[in-house]
Image (tube, grey):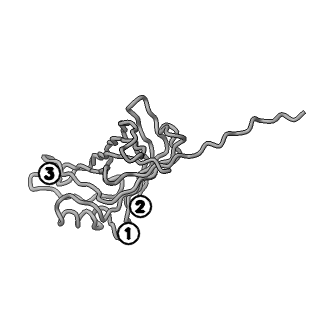
């Protein structure tokens, strides 16, 4: 008698795409170590695959942001950020995050993955607050998240800096990341 395994159930992946109209991706950096400058990306994309609607089962999380869409509300600074001193958008048009593991405990979670900026990839962990899921007035299922974290820009080759006459650095190494994300379930 042959020992047969029970047939495997086909679990269909649920696909989610970002709703860019209801999402934003920001970064904050200290300037002269006394104030904080906020910037954001105007063009970005995020795709997630889960089993059913359970984000704990996420098998694919891929985020990209277009470097040329950086906006700090100062054209001269934005041009400098896109230059070889910082992101070098001519050679590295996007930054990319690939999620490896989503660990949740209720509404709080951590997302582990690899962040690639300027051709350098490093593991990072982001804090995630799950806002829940809801069906909007148009029948679309949406899920909301607040994502935050901190990275060292120098680890990604963004090493430009200057020193003031008093010896203070112009741009801090630590970059705080904050994103409000709304995903739309794909049918």
In the image, what residue occupies the spot 40% across and 35% down?
Answer: 109
Direction right: furthest residue:
1
The quadrant the N terminus occupies is top right
**Contact, mark 1 vs mark 2 (Cβ under 8 Å):** yes
In the image, what residue occupies the spot 12% across and 56% down?
Answer: 164
Residue position marked by numbered label 1 in the rendering? 91
Where's residue 66, x and y in %?
A: 35, 62
Name the N-terminal-most of marks 1 and 3.
3
Could one spot residue 116 in this view of the protein? no
Name the N-terminal-most of marks 1 and 2.
1
Q: Write down the quadrant of residue 96 in the picture.
A: bottom left
Residue position marked by numbered label 3 in the rendering? 32
Q: Of the residues tagged 1 and 3, which is closer to the observer?
A: 1
Cα distance between the residues tagged 1 and 3: 28 Å
- Disc 2 is placed on an element classified as loop
Direction top: furthest residue:
106
- Disc 3 is placed on an element classified as loop
Q: Is residue 49 left or right of residue 95?
A: right
Could one spot residue 14 in this view of the protein? yes
Where's residue 56, x and y in %?
A: 49, 37
Q: Is residue 168 shown above or below 86? A: above
Residue position marked by numbered label 2 in the rendering? 119
Count neighbours of disc 1 (C-alpha within 10 A) and say few if under 14, some if 14 to 19, many if 20 or more. few
Where's residue 5, x and y in %?
A: 77, 35
Where's residue 102, x and y in %?
A: 46, 39
Q: Is residue 109 left or right of residue 76?
A: right
**Contact, mark 1 vs mark 3 (Cβ under 8 Å):** no
Cα distance between the residues tagged 1 and 2: 9 Å
Residue closer to the observer: 67 or 152? 67
């Amino acid at each position: 008698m042959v020992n047969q395994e029970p047939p495997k159930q086909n679990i269909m992946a649920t696909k989610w795409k970002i709703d860019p109209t209801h999402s934003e991706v920001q970064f904050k950096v200290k300037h002269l170590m006394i104030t904080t400058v906020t910037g954001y990306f105007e063009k970005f994309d995020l795709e997630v695959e889960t089993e059913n609607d359970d984000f704990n089962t996420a098998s694919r999380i891929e985020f990209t942001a277009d470097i040329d869409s950086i906006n700090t509300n100062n054209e001269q600074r934005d041009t400098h950020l896109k230059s070889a001193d910082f992101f070098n958008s001519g050679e590295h048009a996007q930054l990319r995050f690939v999620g490896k593991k989503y660990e949740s405990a209720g509404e709080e979670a951590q997302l582990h993955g690899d962040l690639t900026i300027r051709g350098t990839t490093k593991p990072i962990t982001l804090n995630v607050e799950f806002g829940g899921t809801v069906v909007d007035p148009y029948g679309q299922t949406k899920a909301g998240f607040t994502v935050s974290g901190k990275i060292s820009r120098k680890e990604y080759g963004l090493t430009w800096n200057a020193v003031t006459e008093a010896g203070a650095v112009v741009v801090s190494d630590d970059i705080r990341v904050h994103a409000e994300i709304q995903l739309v379930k794909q049918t």
